[in-house]
Image (spheres, rainbow, N blue to C red):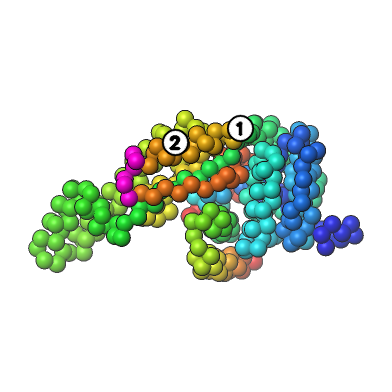
Amino acid sequence: MTLGMVMWIFRAVHRAAKEELENEQRNVRAELSDLYRQLERGEITEEQFDEKEGPLLDRLESSKGEQA
Amino acid sequence: MAGDENSNPKGTYLYSVIPAEAVDKLKLDVEGIDGAEVRPLVCGPLAAIVSDAEKTELRPERKNLSAHSAVLRALMDQTSLLPVAFGVVAGSEREVRELLADHESEMVEQLDGVKGRVEMGLRGLLRVPDTFRYFVEKFPDLEKMRDETFSGGNPSREQMIELGQAFSETLEQFQNESADEAEGRLQAVGKVRVNDPRSEEEALNLAVLVPREALDEFTRAVEELAPNLDENIELQVTGPWPPYNFVDLRIHAAGEEEGEEAR
């Protein structure tokens, strides 16, 4: 099961977000990584990060709910 | 607890893959996710950088993303590396070893490709108060269309949509041309990857894989690029970063279903 995740691991996160992403959860995970990358690079502010992080984490939770 | 021999980790968290030869000199005095000890796991010519994980799934929240990134940055100063995307927890050390063994040749090849090189980011931001107005002034075709659209008083919804489309096309063309100009000048320094701009304001967004000894050359190329772009484009350089944009291993694991819900 864990090895199932292997497929996306070496892919750059950016592009992972755009290309053949398999499901909502991966989408959201990639978006969050990408968002952090933007924060790290000074492309967005702390406030902008915080503003977007909450809703993305909520989306992640709810997609897990649907899957269960 | 970090480094506690008696704890029973749920899994092995994977940060990166590096050449095994780099392990001897490696200093890993950086904390991993949840403060866990970060260690190398050698397997043939490769080594995985891992830590014990108490959960099989990690929440992609800031604290965790930041720990992951800190480990990559610590590695980057010491060795060439393949950055692994956030959140990969293998079931055990054995699973990580198997993964490395199964993909040894691809990983070795990818490592060779990034050896001695770092990723630099370059963004160009169009600093104007109103992008639409600026484009109308800059591109006569768009101006003509705007004037025609508003010539008979209130334009119809359809006319507005058409104008909007013309604006989008002009913007896209402007972004493409800016990126092409940048790519043309920077590819002498290193491999270039052009990313899609994220907003109207972003005229270009690209990553360049620069040999460490050519970092000055990269800076000069950026300086020479500036006057060849729209005068309102402000260039921002970031880096060096791990080669996020230049590692492209396509690993398909058994039991992985092709999904349909892409964005």
| Drawn side of residue B112 relative to residue B215, left or right | right
* Spot occupied by residue B186 in the image (x, y as percentages of width and height): 45, 35
Q: Is residue B246 above or below residue B168?
A: above
Q: Is residue A39 above or below residue B39?
A: below
| Drawn side of residue B76 relative to residue B224, left or right | right
Pointer 2: what residue? B221
Does the image show residue B198?
yes
| Kind of residue sitting beneath label 2 | Ala
**10 Å crowding of disc 2: few (<14), some (14-19), many (20+):** some
* Spot occupied by residue B222 in the image (x, y as percentages of width and height): 44, 40
Q: Earlier in the sequence, mark 1 or mark 2?
A: 1
Does the image show residue A2?
no
Q: How many marks?
A: 2
Q: Nearer the viewer, residue B167 or B202?
A: B202
Pointer 1: what residue? B113
| Kind of residue sitting beneath label 1 | Gly
Q: Is residue B209 magenta?
A: no
Q: Secondary structure at mark 1?
A: helix
Region rendered in magenta: B227-232
Residue at x 64%, y 53% (from the top left corner): B69
Q: Report if the CB atoms under discs 1 and 2 are less than 8 Å apart.
A: no
Q: Secondary structure at mark 2?
A: helix
State the CA–CA distance, disc 1 to disc 2.
22 Å
Residue at x 54%, y 33% (from the top left corner): B214
| Drawn side of residue B208 relative to residue B253, left or right | left
Q: What chain does mark 1 sit on?
A: B
Residue at x 18%, y 53% (from the top left corner): B143
The N terminus of chain B: image quadrant: bottom right
Q: Is residue A10 above or below residue B190?
A: below
**Image quadrant of residue A34?**
bottom right
Q: What chain does mark 2 sit on?
A: B
Residue placed furthest toward the right: B6
